[in-house]
Image: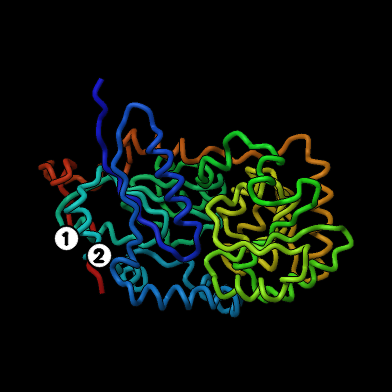
């Protein structure tokens, strides 16, 4: 039987790496789906539509998360409650509208999936006069109302609590699916042996390793110096990510310390997770889900007010991680985490296989909100019914 071809447009943003990794997890799942051939398009909409502004905003976002967490938490709280048809909501969702309209005309996707709450798709569809099923994957364990738009056909959320919150905002329950947060297949697949991974990465299989996502944490040198005073003998694997300046600085500072190994960017973080006795990280929802799926004990250091605090508290209530607010509590939490790795729980937490469930639901194409978008039934360029622009309120 000939495979049916399909086009999927996934819209993300690089404010943190999690939204992109969720997009890659979905891309991976679509690509492996049997019997259907997909043309996948992953688009950083804000970066493509407003590259100069994107660079400025991303820098400000990173600085505020690291150096002004209370200010970031305040802004998160103030904007939580915004609605799509209020001035702030209309303004935010207008970014990338022209670019999105062009993408819809050129790609002609069968469905659009949002993994970041830039929801210019609806105004782009109104201006283009077409309708395409749209889905939103909420990539946190804490709900912010910026994600919510009444014309979204399906929401994929992490928890039953979040589903109840969204339903309480007037969204029909059959449009809200509790799937968990998508993670890439390498965090779920068959594990390689510790000996093999250590040989590949130049590590000693007899050593205890603490994986520190140092590129995402504030005051990194002080944090590392504190961990080096641990009574337990452990080697610190410091992942600096794409921050080349930090990587160079750490290498120079700890070049004589055999118990410190500095790692730059890696797309195989699961290998380091599998040999680590614990991971020290910020409370990004995707990183937490990946680590918990791998069964590595997690220590969250100084969770930032807002979605990160919510993510940490969600898993903290399930005793899946420890939180540390200062150097002393961090050392204590890491020591406990190392011991817990040696005595794993009888019933480990296994996050849902969200990607598989989401792809199956998208392929069903049964978004309840789709009926609200139909007008005359004339075919659009993508093959979907035309869109009634009166359903979208005009922007500012």
105 relative to 279 in the view: left or right: left
* Residue pictured at 60% horizontal, 47% vertical: 270
* Residue at the farthest top position: 1
The label number, if any, that marks residue 7 in the structure image: none
Task: From the viewer's side, name the closer residue of 186 and 180.
Answer: 186
Contact (Cβ within 8 Å) of mark 2 with mark 1: yes
Q: In this picture, is 144 found above or below 28? A: below
SS state under label 1? helix
Rendered location of residue 384, percent (x, y)? 19, 42
* Quadrant of the frame with the N terminus: top left
Query: Residue 44 sits in which quadrant?
Result: bottom left
Front in this rendered view, residue 76 or 187: 187
- The residue wearing badge 2 is 97
Residue 367, compared with residue 266, is above or below; it is above
SS for tag 2? helix
Of the numbered discs 2 and 1, the one sitting upstream in the chain is 2
- Whether residue 125 is visible to the viewer of this picture, yes or no, is yes
Evaluate whether residue 94 shows in this view: no
Please identify, in this view, whether the residue under mark 2 or under mark 1 is nearer the observer: 2
Query: Dot 1 corresponds to which residue?
Result: 127
Q: Residue at x 25, y 42 (%)?
A: 110
Residue situated furthest right in the rendering = 231
Number of other residues with Cα within 10 Å of mark 1, as a class: few under 14, some 14 to 19, many 20 or more: some
The image position of residue 92, as x and y in percent, is 35, 69
């Amino acid at each position: 039987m000939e495979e049916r071809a399909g086009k999927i447009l996934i819209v993300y943003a690089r404010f943190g790496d999690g939204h992109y990794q969720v997009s890659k997890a979905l891309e991976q799942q679509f690509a492996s789906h049997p019997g259907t051939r997909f043309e996948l398009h992953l688009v950083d909409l804000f970066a493509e539509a407003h590259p100069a502004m994107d660079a400025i905003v991303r820098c400000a976002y990173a600085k505020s998360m690291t150096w002004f967490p209370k200010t970031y938490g305040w802004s998160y709280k103030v904007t939580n409650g915004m609605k799509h048809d209020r001035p702030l909501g209309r303004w935010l969702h207008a970014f990338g509208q022209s670019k999105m309209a062009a993408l819809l005309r050129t790609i002609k996707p069968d469905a659009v999936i949002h993994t970041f709450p830039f929801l210019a798709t609806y105004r782009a569809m109104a201006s283009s006069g077409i309708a395409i099923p749209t889905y939103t994957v909420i990539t946190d364990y804490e709900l912010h109302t910026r994600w919510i738009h009444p014309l979204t056909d399906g929401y994929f959320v992490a928890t039953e609590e979040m589903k109840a919150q969204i339903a309480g905002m007037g969204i029909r329950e059959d449009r809200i699916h509790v799937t968990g947060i998508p993670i890439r297949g390498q965090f779920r697949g068959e594990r390689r042996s510790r000996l093999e991974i250590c040989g590949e990465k130049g590590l000693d299989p007899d050593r205890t390793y603490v994986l520190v996502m140092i590129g995402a944490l504030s005051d990194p040198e002080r944090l590392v110096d504190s961990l080096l005073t641990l009574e337990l003998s452990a080697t610190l694997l410091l992942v600096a990510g794409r921050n080349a300046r930090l990587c160079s600085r750490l290498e120079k500072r700890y070049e004589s310390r055999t118990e410190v190994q500095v790692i730059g960017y890696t797309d195989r973080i699961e290998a380091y997770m599998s040999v680590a006795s614990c991971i020290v990280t910020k409370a990004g929802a995707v990183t937490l889900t990946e680590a918990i799926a791998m069964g590595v004990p997690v220590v969250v250091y100084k969770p930032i007010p807002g979605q990160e605090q919510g993510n940490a508290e969600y898993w903290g209530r399930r005793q899946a991680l420890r939180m540390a607010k200062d150097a002393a509590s961090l050392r204590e939490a890491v020591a406990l985490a190392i011991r817990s790795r040696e005595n794993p729980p009888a019933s480990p937490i296994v996050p849902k296989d969200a990607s598989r469930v989401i792809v199956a639901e998208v392929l069903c194409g049964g978004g309840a909100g789709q009926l609200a978008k139909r007008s005359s039934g004339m075919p659009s360029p993508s093959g979907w019914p035309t869109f009634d622009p009166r359903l979208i309120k005009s922007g500012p």
